[in-house]
Amino acid sequence: MRKVGSCCLLKYSIRMTFTKVETQKHTFVSMLRKVMCIQGIRDAEEIFDCPQVAVFDTAFHGTMPPKAYMYAIPFQLYKELGVRRYGFHGTSYEYLLEQTGYVLNKPKDDLNLIIFHLGAGASMAAIKQGKCIDTTMGLTPLPGLVMATRSGDIDPAIWQMLATEKGLSNEEISTMLNKESGMFGLCGEKDMRAVWDAIEEGSKQHKLALDVFIHRIRTYLGAYLVHLQGQVDALVFSAGIGEASARTRRCICEGLEGFGIEIDAGKNTEGKSKKPMQIQKESSKIKILVIQTDEELHIARQTLQVINSHYQMTSRGA
């Protein structure tokens, strides 16, 4: 089975491999991700005289079993093109896993978590004994949850219907699903604060958008509770919406007392807190945490670890 790469020092041979990708026929993923990475590597080489490290936000999801990451399409497409679910936001999930371990005073390898990375780009992950066993994004960041401008899960046949009935090109459909859909497509707003403000003013369209957003999250929450066989230490909310919107967290968790999830209205306050918060009732079987993510810090730590390891190996070999 194909492995998902972790962070690595970018040596000359690796940089040349990335550059070579530019001259070859791009896969869909290459077009979305690799071109930007190549340009960033080139620009950094011109500006800085220092080692470069590649940190992959797909790496954390490399522990998913084949039953979770395989698509039910001809297997040859996986072998030839690597078509499978990879997942994203991995640096955020890894950071939040570590922070949750500190909050609960428990080794991360013993933790079973359901993490909600709810920002403009939104995803969820199921963590079993410190390892990712499922996540909502796929080959690209498009599927899964409803996002600010991304559609999330849709019937794949919609693509063909749009091409046939509306005469749209692949590029136009991709732009629609990635930049003109999601909350923006449903109600014209990208910012969850503006959505809530409109709902309070009586907008049914914005309420519909919120309902679709919440319904999709709760669908995956139910699936992940089953995947973890009900043995969940905590739900962890993070990123812009997850950290700041108490109303959204309430909507996700309300009515789930039968599953051991009891949110405390007094603790579930609006606005971001720099310190981790526990917002569950004392009687809640599953803890509910709000933790600020810090992907940049985690990337910096991984970078330092890789560079230190490289220099230690170089010193021993000298």
Image (cartoon, grey):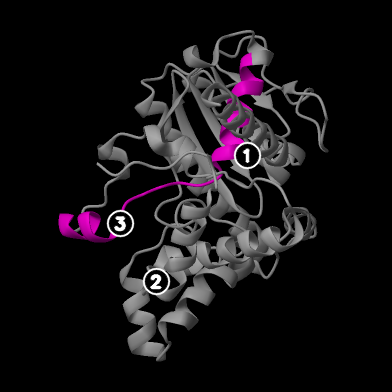
* Disc 1 to disc 3, C-alpha distance: 35 Å
Q: Nearer the viewer, residue 187 or 70?
A: 70
Q: Quadrant of the N terminus?
A: top left
At 44% from the left and 59% from the top, the residue drawn is: 17
- Within 10 angstroms of label 1, few (less than 14), some, or many (20 or more) residues? some
At 76% from the left and 60% from the top, the residue drawn is: 47
Q: Is residue 223 visible?
A: no
* Disc 2 to disc 3, C-alpha distance: 13 Å
Residue found at the far front of this picture:
318
Q: Nearer the viewer, residue 101 or 314?
A: 314
- In the rendered image, residue 44, in percent from the top left (x then y), is placed at 69, 58
- Within 10 angstroms of label 2, few (less than 14), some, or many (20 or more) residues? few
- In the rendered image, residue 159, in percent from the top left (x then y), is placed at 37, 75
Predominant SS along the magenta part: helix
Residue on which the image places disc 2: 26
At 80% from the left and 60% from the top, the residue drawn is: 201
Residue on which the image places disc 3: 83
Identify residue type, mark 1.
Answer: Cys
Q: Is residue 125 left or right of residue 4?
A: right
Q: Is 171 rendered above or below residue 185?
A: below
- In the rendered image, residue 174, in percent from the top left (x then y), is placed at 47, 74
Q: Nearer the viewer, residue 201 or 27?
A: 27
